[in-house]
Image (tube, rainbow, N blue to C red):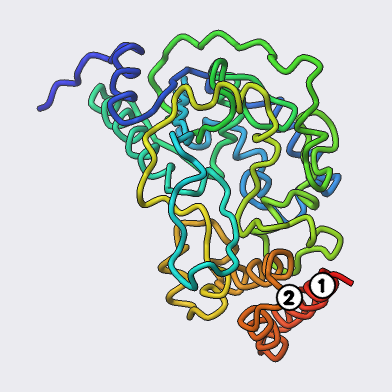
Amino acid sequence: MRRPEPLPTLDELRELAHEHGIDRLGVAPAAVLERARTALHERKAAGLHDTMQFTYRNPDRSTDPGRAVPGARSVIVGARSYAVDEPAAASHEPGHPGGPVGRIARYAHVDHYAPLRQGLRAIAHRLRRSDERAVAFADDNSIVDREVAVLGGLGWYGKSANVLVPGAGSWFVLGSVVTTAEYPVSAPVPDGCGTCRRCLDGCPTGAIVAPGVVDARRCLSWLLQRPGTIPLEHRAAVGDRFYGCDDCQEVCPPTIHLGRREARPADPAATTTIDLLAVLAASDAELLERFGRFYLHDRDPRWWRRNALVVLGNVGRPDDPAVVEALERHLHHADPVLREHAAWALAHLRERVPA
């Protein structure tokens, strides 16, 4: 019969985390996340979640680590930086050279969650060798990762609702290992925002309605993922964003001044922009192969086409026959959502023609 190994120290787990590309590691208690639970219920009651599910689907479950792992005593929380050396110089999807392109948010340039999960699973596997229960979670509705990151001493809640890591800012993806192993809880990090409100003032749609409170009904990052129509009043504000929005982070002083301290080498496979006309000409299978790692409601490619139509209306050249043809073609599409967005894009495109 196999003998359990001694429980690893937290320093040993940190070393294992670093070997797998996890930059920071802390420990939060496995108690009910009362602050997050209250906030989720209140914001859901106020409609601030829009149609978002994720941790809003069942706040009592996603704020109780004990439901994820019965008998849990600790939540080991990790952060992996997605800052890179040359974030603006990466590749874009092939298509029409010089044609109109849409921008992809920084966190989605490459899949940062896959290596994060690999590292967290390595930690969970090591804990199980000591006969402890341990389960890794990343980008999962089982636990509110930002709350455990704050409780685990990785950072503080910025006014943008992002977690800011001291000396590095907010360019991090987060995940955790819920375990029956017991470790000392990490010291909290004091608020570092002070009187700064650049994220509130810099949001293009005013989605940050109070410090730390985001109205998903106005958040461009969510509106480009959710199903249905993009609200008419926010379509021009979408600008060239095809997927995600970085504005609240790109005006954050700690993030823009310190965020590249932990930058990784630029990934030649990174995709920062996409060819809009190529998206509108692609089949469902091609779009799923190209963008399948992006979260999108029901993995339905129609929402990528919807986004491309809006961005094309914002950035396309009114005198480009290929742009006009793509929009006019979608005026007759079988999907009424795409027809409606194509009509808006074509009208907006023509409004931009100088008098």
Q: CA distance from mark 2 to mark 1?
A: 7 Å
Please state the horizontal and vertical placement of residue 152, each as a whole percent of the image: 54, 18
- Asked if the residues shown at circle 2 and circle 1 are in contact, with their CB atoms under 8 angstroms apart, the answer is yes
Tell me which residue sits at (85%, 37%) in the image: 209
* Image quadrant assignment for residue 249: top right
Toward the viewer: 215 or 77? 215
Q: Amino acid at mark 1?
A: Val
Residue 326: horizontal and vertical position, in percent?
63, 82
Q: Is residue 246 left or right of residue 352?
A: left
Label 2 SS: loop
Q: Residue at x 46, y 31 (%)?
A: 81
* Quadrant of residue 190 within the rendered picture: top right
Viewer-side residue, 353 vs 289: 353
> Label 2 is placed on what type of residue?
Pro
Could you tell me residue 243's position as x and y percent? 60, 56
Nearest the camera: 348 or 121? Answer: 348
Horizontal side, residue 50 vs residue 135: left or right:
right
Question: Is 96 rendered above or below residue 113?
Answer: below
Q: Is residue 147 visible?
A: no
What residue lies at 28% left-to-right and 32% top-to-bottom?
Answer: 125
Q: Earlier in the sequence, mark 2 or mark 1?
A: 2
Residue position for label 2: 318
Q: Most extreme residue toward the left, as rendered?
A: 1
Residue 134 horizontal side relative to residue 163, left or right: left
Q: Is residue 10 above or below residue 177?
A: above
Q: Secondary structure at mark 1?
A: loop
* Residue at x 43%, y 67% (from the top left corner): 94
Q: Quadrant of residue 215?
A: top right
Q: Residue 82: image x %, image y %?
A: 47, 36
Q: Residue furthest right?
A: 355
* Quadrant position of the C terminus in the picture: bottom right
Which residue carries the number 1 mark?
353
